Image (tube, rainbow, N blue to C red):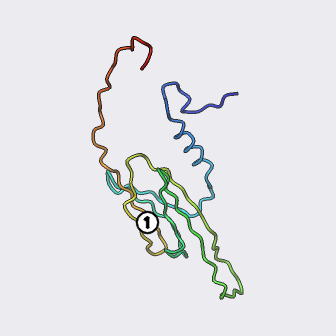
Amino acid sequence: MARSSIFGSPMLVGFEPFERMLEQMSKASSDGYPPYNIEQLNERQFRISLAVAGFGPEELSVVVDDSRLTISGHHREDGHQSFLHRGIATRQFQRSFLLANGLEISGSWLDNGMLHIDIVRLDPGTRVRQIEIRSSPKNGSQ
C-alpha cells in the first residue's frame, strides 16, 4: 500500500528532501525538555529562547547544519561532589528546529538560565528569470 503524503502530488517535483526532513522532525524527541519559546521580534527577526537553568556555556552547543538548528546540552559530572539527596535533574538534551530558506542565525547568548538564539530573515531579492524555450533538436541529440 502506498503511503499518503502532502508531497505526493505530481505537481510537487523535487520535494523529497523536505519530506524526509519533516519525517525526521516529527520523530524527534517530544518530551518537552527543555521548554522553549519562539518570538517574532519584528518582520525580519525571530528569537528562540530555551530554559536551560543549571547549564553553563561550555555545556551547551548550538549548531546549524544546512537548514537544521540543533541545540544540545550535556552536564559535565564533578566527581568531587557528595550528595545526601540528589533531586535536581542533570540530564542531557537535544532539541532541533528546521529553518526556512533565507533564515540565518545572527547570535546566541546565555542569560539567567535562558539560552537565546536570534534569527534574521535575509532579504531574498527578486529571483524572477526568463526560461529560454529551445527548438527540438533535429538529430535526436540535446
Most foreground residue, 46 or 58 = 58
| Crowding near the residue tagged with mark 1, few <14, some 14–19, many ≥20 C-alpha atoms within 10 Å | some
- Compared to residue 75, the image places residue 95 above or below, namely above
- Compared to residue 34, the image places residue 2 above or below, namely above
Most foreground residue, 42 or 75 = 75
Judged from this view, the residue extending furthest toward the top is 138
Could you tell me which residue is drawn at 50 percent across and 35 percent down? 15
Could you tell me which residue is drawn at 32 percent across and 54 percent down? 42
Could you tell me residue 26's position as x and y percent?
Answer: 60, 47
Q: In the visual, does 134 lie left or right of 96?
A: left
Could you tell me residue 59's position as x and y percent?
Answer: 54, 73
Could you tell me residue 123's position as x and y percent?
Answer: 29, 47
Q: Which residue is mark 1?
A: 116
Most foreground residue, 130 or 75 = 130
Q: Quadrant of residue 31?
A: bottom right
Quarter occupied by the N terminus: top right
Could you tell me residue 79's position as x and y percent?
Answer: 67, 85
Quarter occupied by the C terminus: top left
- Compared to residue 9, the image places residue 120 above or below, namely below
Could you tell me which residue is drawn at 38 percent across and 14 percent down? 136
Badge 1 marks a residue whose secondary structure is strand
Badge count: 1
Amino acid type shown at disc 1: His
